[in-house]
């Protein structure tokens, strides 16, 4: 099988980012974005997705984390799309449930080349407003909004449709976001695997 790997460099006036990705890896990660929490989450994403992922990012963190966070998502997504190539033989769909103490999430992915992000709040309480006001960290803060922005940038550039369901939330934002990154990795591991029975593109259209 042809090696499914890619290297992408993206430079703007706000960020300078290089990503190396091997989809068929061992879960090895070397992440340096300057955003400690994002580094931790991407390490988990790679570990649970069995992706070898290297990220080197320099950004205008003196302003805030927005540009670096979003542009890192753009660059990783672009690397995924390039590494997947014509997507011949992939399973295309993937799903994962991940619990983290009192948090439970489900992620479902479709490598469809029709990218979109949908977040569902499957709890009895309305937690959307609560999530909007929670942050992680002291000097460099990370929020659920930052997660959404990263995921949106990643998915739009990778060509992936993804649904994220929050099935339980115990007010621990760290656990919630960690469960989401782990579930994303696991769902995409399944979706990118080669199905030995499939000899062509996984679509009746003949292309994705």
Image (cartoon, helix red, strand yellow):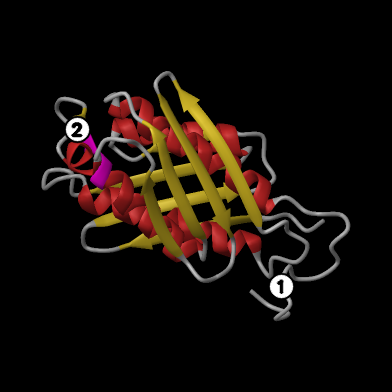
Chain part drawn in magenta: 141-145
In the image, is residue 12 above or below residue 19?
Answer: below
Q: Is residue 178 magenta?
A: no
Which corner quadrant holds the C terminus?
Answer: bottom right
Q: State which quadrant residue 65 falls in.
A: top left
At x 11%, y 48%, the residue is 63
Image side of residue 57 versus residue 195, left or right: left
Image side of residue 160 versus residue 12, left or right: right
Residue 189 is situated, as x and y percent measured from the top left of the image, at 64, 44
In the image, is residue 131 above or below residue 101?
Answer: below
Residue under label 2? 135
Residue under label 1? 203
Which residue sits furthest top? 101
Q: State which quadrant residue 121 falls in.
A: top left
Q: CA distance from mark 2 to mark 1?
A: 41 Å
Q: Is residue 144 magenta?
A: yes
In the image, is residue 174 above or below residue 143?
Answer: above
Residue 172 is situated, as x and y percent measured from the top left of the image, at 29, 24
Q: Secondary structure at mark 1?
A: loop
Residue 197 visible: yes
Image side of residue 95 versus residue 175, left or right: right
């Amino acid at each position: 099988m042809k090696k499914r790997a890619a290297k992408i460099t993206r430079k703007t006036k706000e960020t300078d980012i290089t990503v190396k990705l091997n989809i068929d890896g061992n879960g090895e990660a070397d992440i340096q974005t300057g955003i400690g929490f994002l580094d931790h989450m991407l390490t988990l994403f790679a570990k649970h997705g069995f992706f070898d992922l290297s990220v080197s990012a320099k950004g205008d963190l003196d302003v805030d984390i927005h540009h670096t966070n979003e542009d890192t998502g753009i660059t990783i997504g672009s690397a995924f799309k390039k590494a997947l190539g014509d997507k011949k033989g992939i399973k295309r769909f993937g799903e994962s449930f991940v619990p983290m103490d009192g948090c439970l999430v489900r992620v479902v992915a479709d490598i469809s080349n029709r990218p979109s992000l949908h977040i569902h709040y499957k709890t009895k309480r309305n937690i959307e407003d609560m999530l909007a006001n929670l942050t992680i960290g002291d000097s460099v803060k990370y929020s659920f909004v930052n997660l959404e922005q990263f995921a949106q940038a990643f998915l739009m550039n990778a060509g992936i449709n993804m649904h994220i369901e929050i099935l339980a939330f115990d007010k621990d934002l760290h656990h919630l976001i960690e469960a989401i990154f782990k579930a994303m990795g696991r769902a995409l591991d399944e979706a990118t695997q080669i199905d030995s029975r499939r000899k062509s593109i996984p679509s009746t259209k003949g292309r994705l």
